[in-house]
Image (cartoon, rainbow, N blue to C red):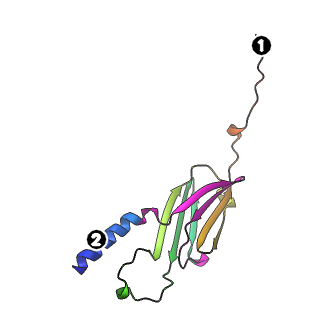
Amino acid sequence: RDSIRKAVDAGVKSITNSNFPAVDIYRQGDSLVVQTEPLDGLDATTIDVEMVGQDLTVRGTTRNPNDVGQDAYLRRERNYGQFARTLTIPVRGVANEARAKVKDGKLTISFPLEVDSDDDVIRVQVADS
Protein backbone atom coordinates (compact mmCIF):
# COMPACT_ATOMS: atom_id res chain seq x y z
CA ARG A 1 0.00 0.00 0.00
CA ASP A 2 2.77 2.41 0.89
CA SER A 3 4.38 1.95 -2.54
CA ILE A 4 1.10 2.63 -4.33
CA ARG A 5 0.36 5.65 -2.15
CA LYS A 6 3.84 7.08 -2.79
CA ALA A 7 3.49 6.52 -6.53
CA VAL A 8 0.09 8.24 -6.58
CA ASP A 9 1.42 11.12 -4.46
CA ALA A 10 4.40 11.53 -6.82
CA GLY A 11 2.06 11.56 -9.84
CA VAL A 12 -0.22 14.16 -8.24
CA LYS A 13 2.81 16.23 -7.27
CA SER A 14 4.12 16.22 -10.84
CA ILE A 15 0.75 17.47 -12.10
CA THR A 16 0.23 20.12 -9.42
CA ASN A 17 3.81 21.41 -9.63
CA SER A 18 3.33 22.56 -13.23
CA ASN A 19 2.30 25.97 -11.90
CA PHE A 20 4.66 26.11 -8.96
CA PRO A 21 5.50 28.60 -7.79
CA ALA A 22 2.42 30.70 -8.43
CA VAL A 23 3.27 34.14 -9.82
CA ASP A 24 1.75 37.54 -10.44
CA ILE A 25 2.84 39.49 -13.53
CA TYR A 26 1.97 43.17 -13.66
CA ARG A 27 3.04 46.54 -15.01
CA GLN A 28 4.39 49.13 -12.63
CA GLY A 29 5.05 52.41 -14.41
CA ASP A 30 7.41 51.67 -17.31
CA SER A 31 8.47 48.32 -15.83
CA LEU A 32 7.19 44.77 -15.83
CA VAL A 33 7.19 42.91 -12.51
CA VAL A 34 7.04 39.15 -11.95
CA GLN A 35 6.55 38.15 -8.31
CA THR A 36 6.26 34.67 -6.80
CA GLU A 37 4.09 33.60 -3.94
CA PRO A 38 5.94 33.48 -0.59
CA LEU A 39 8.13 30.38 -0.50
CA ASP A 40 9.49 28.84 2.70
CA GLY A 41 13.25 28.76 2.92
CA LEU A 42 13.83 30.67 -0.32
CA ASP A 43 17.33 32.10 -0.42
CA ALA A 44 18.85 34.35 -3.10
CA THR A 45 21.86 32.02 -3.37
CA THR A 46 19.62 29.13 -4.50
CA ILE A 47 17.81 31.03 -7.29
CA ASP A 48 18.63 31.07 -11.01
CA VAL A 49 16.68 33.40 -13.33
CA GLU A 50 17.10 33.23 -17.10
CA MET A 51 15.33 35.01 -19.96
CA VAL A 52 15.42 33.74 -23.56
CA GLY A 53 13.24 35.76 -25.92
CA GLN A 54 9.98 36.17 -24.03
CA ASP A 55 10.44 33.01 -21.96
CA LEU A 56 11.41 33.59 -18.33
CA THR A 57 12.71 30.55 -16.42
CA VAL A 58 13.01 30.53 -12.64
CA ARG A 59 14.84 27.69 -10.90
CA GLY A 60 15.48 27.40 -7.23
CA THR A 61 15.36 25.43 -4.04
CA THR A 62 13.12 25.83 -1.02
CA ARG A 63 13.60 24.17 2.33
CA ASN A 64 11.26 23.04 5.03
CA PRO A 65 11.57 25.43 8.00
CA ASN A 66 10.17 22.77 10.37
CA ASP A 67 12.42 20.25 12.04
CA VAL A 68 10.01 17.36 11.46
CA GLY A 69 10.96 13.96 10.15
CA GLN A 70 9.35 12.67 6.96
CA ASP A 71 7.62 9.82 8.81
CA ALA A 72 6.00 12.21 11.31
CA TYR A 73 3.75 13.86 8.72
CA LEU A 74 0.12 12.81 8.58
CA ARG A 75 -0.51 15.10 5.61
CA ARG A 76 1.93 17.25 3.68
CA GLU A 77 0.66 19.58 0.93
CA ARG A 78 3.46 22.13 0.81
CA ASN A 79 6.38 21.37 -1.48
CA TYR A 80 10.05 21.74 -0.67
CA GLY A 81 13.15 21.11 -2.67
CA GLN A 82 14.06 21.99 -6.22
CA PHE A 83 11.62 23.68 -8.59
CA ALA A 84 11.67 25.16 -12.07
CA ARG A 85 9.05 27.12 -13.94
CA THR A 86 9.09 28.73 -17.39
CA LEU A 87 6.66 31.52 -18.18
CA THR A 88 6.02 33.28 -21.46
CA ILE A 89 5.96 36.99 -20.72
CA PRO A 90 3.08 38.61 -22.66
CA VAL A 91 4.97 41.84 -23.41
CA ARG A 92 8.56 42.54 -24.41
CA GLY A 93 10.98 43.71 -21.79
CA VAL A 94 14.63 44.69 -21.76
CA ALA A 95 15.98 41.44 -20.31
CA ASN A 96 19.59 42.60 -19.91
CA GLU A 97 18.35 45.29 -17.48
CA ALA A 98 16.40 42.86 -15.30
CA ARG A 99 16.83 42.97 -11.54
CA ALA A 100 15.79 40.27 -9.07
CA LYS A 101 15.56 40.20 -5.28
CA VAL A 102 14.25 37.94 -2.54
CA LYS A 103 12.39 39.52 0.37
CA ASP A 104 10.12 37.77 2.87
CA GLY A 105 10.29 34.58 0.79
CA LYS A 106 9.04 36.31 -2.39
CA LEU A 107 11.14 36.48 -5.52
CA THR A 108 10.54 39.73 -7.40
CA ILE A 109 11.94 40.23 -10.90
CA SER A 110 11.55 43.58 -12.62
CA PHE A 111 12.73 44.96 -15.92
CA PRO A 112 11.89 47.93 -18.12
CA LEU A 113 9.35 47.44 -20.87
CA GLU A 114 10.77 47.56 -24.36
CA VAL A 115 9.82 50.71 -26.21
CA ASP A 116 8.43 49.74 -29.60
CA SER A 117 8.39 52.49 -32.18
CA ASP A 118 5.30 50.87 -33.74
CA ASP A 119 3.38 51.80 -30.61
CA ASP A 120 3.99 55.55 -31.03
CA VAL A 121 0.79 57.51 -31.41
CA ILE A 122 0.71 59.52 -34.59
CA ARG A 123 -1.99 62.15 -34.95
CA VAL A 124 -3.50 62.42 -38.40
CA GLN A 125 -5.03 65.71 -39.46
CA VAL A 126 -8.61 65.33 -40.63
CA ALA A 127 -9.85 67.85 -43.20
CA ASP A 128 -13.31 68.61 -44.52
CA SER A 129 -13.79 67.59 -48.15
Say left or right for 112 vs 75.
right
The outermost residue toward the front is 74
Q: Going 62% across and 66% down the picture, which residue do you hit?
A: 108
Residue 115, numbered label: none
Give the x, y percent position of residue 7: 28, 73
Marks 1 and 2 sit apart, C-alpha to C-alpha, by 73 Å
Q: Nearer the viewer, residue 126 or 78?
A: 78
Callout 2 amino acid? Val
Residue 128, numbered label: 1
User: Element at badge 1?
Assistant: loop
Quadrant of residue 68 within the rendered picture: bottom left
Give the x, y percent position of residue 31: 69, 55
The disc, 1 or 2, on the residue closer to the chain's N-terminal end is 2
40 in magenta: yes
State which region is magenta.
17-45
Quadrant for the C terminus in the image:
top right
Give the x, y percent position of residue 61: 51, 76
The outermost residue toward the top is 129
Residue for badge 2 = 8
Height in image: 61 above or below 123? below
User: Element at badge 2?
Assistant: helix
Quadrant for the N terminus in the image:
bottom left
Say left or right for 34 vs 82.
right
Callout 1 amino acid? Asp
The outermost residue toward the left is 1
Q: Nearer the viewer, residue 110 or 5?
A: 5
